[in-house]
C-alpha cells in the first residue's frame, strides 16, 4: 500500500512502500509541486532505488528555483537507506 497527499499544513505526507510499482504515482503527485516542499516520511515503511530516483528528480527540479525537498520525521531504517546511498548529503533530513 502507498499513499501520498497534502496535509493541512502544506507538507506532503508519504505512507507505505515507495517502490518501483508506486514510483510513477509518486512522481505524478510530486510533479504538481512547484516550490520548496517538506515531505513527512513518518509513515514511510520502505523506499527502493526507484523511489529514491523520484525524490532526486523532484529535488533537482525544485533546486532550479532555489528551493528543494526537505525530509522530516525520517525513521532510523529510512535514514540508514539515505546514508548508505549518499542521499543524506543531498537533502535536509530531520529524524524522528
Image (cartoon, rainbow, N blue to C red):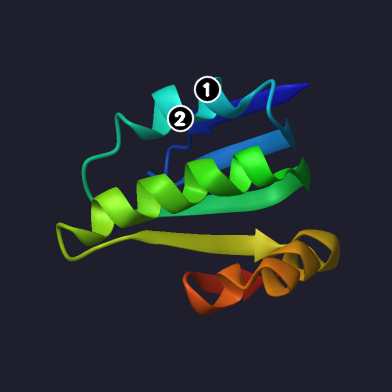
Where 51 falls versus 72 (above or below)?
above
Residue receiving disc 2: 27
Where 35 falls versus 28 (above or below)?
below
| Residue depicted at x 41% and y 23% | 28
| Residue depicted at x 76% and y 59% | 78
Residue receiving disc 1: 24
Asked whether the beta carbons under mark 2 and mark 1 sit within 8 Å of each other, the answer is: yes
Horizontally, is 68 left or right of 94 in the view?
left
Q: Quadrant of residue 65?
A: bottom left
Residue 72 in view in this figure: yes
Kind of element beneath mark 1 = helix
Kind of element beneath mark 2 = helix
Q: Residue furthest left?
A: 65
Residue 48, image x and y in percent? 73, 43
| Residue depicted at x 68% and y 28% | 20
| Residue depicted at x 27% and y 49% | 61
Horizontally, is 5 left or right of 18 in the view?
left
Q: Nearer the viewer, residue 17 or 90?
A: 90
Amino acid at each position: 500500500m502507498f499513499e501520498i497527499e497534502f496535509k493541512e499544513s502544506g507538507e506532503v505526507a508519504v505512507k507505505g512502500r515507495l517502490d518501483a510499482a508506486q514510483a510513477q504515482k509518486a512522481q505524478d503527485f510530486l510533479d504538481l509541486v512547484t516550490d520548496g516542499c517538506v515531505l513527512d516520511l513518518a509513515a514511510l515503511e520502505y523506499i527502493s532505488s526507484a523511489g529514491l530516483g523520484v525524490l532526486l528528480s523532484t529535488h533537482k527540479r525544485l533546486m532550479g528555483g532555489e528551493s528543494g525537498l526537505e525530509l522530516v520525521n525520517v525513521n532510523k531504517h529510512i535514514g540508514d537507506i539515505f546514508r548508505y546511498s549518499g542521499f543524506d548529503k543531498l537533502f535536509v533530513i530531520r529524524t524522528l
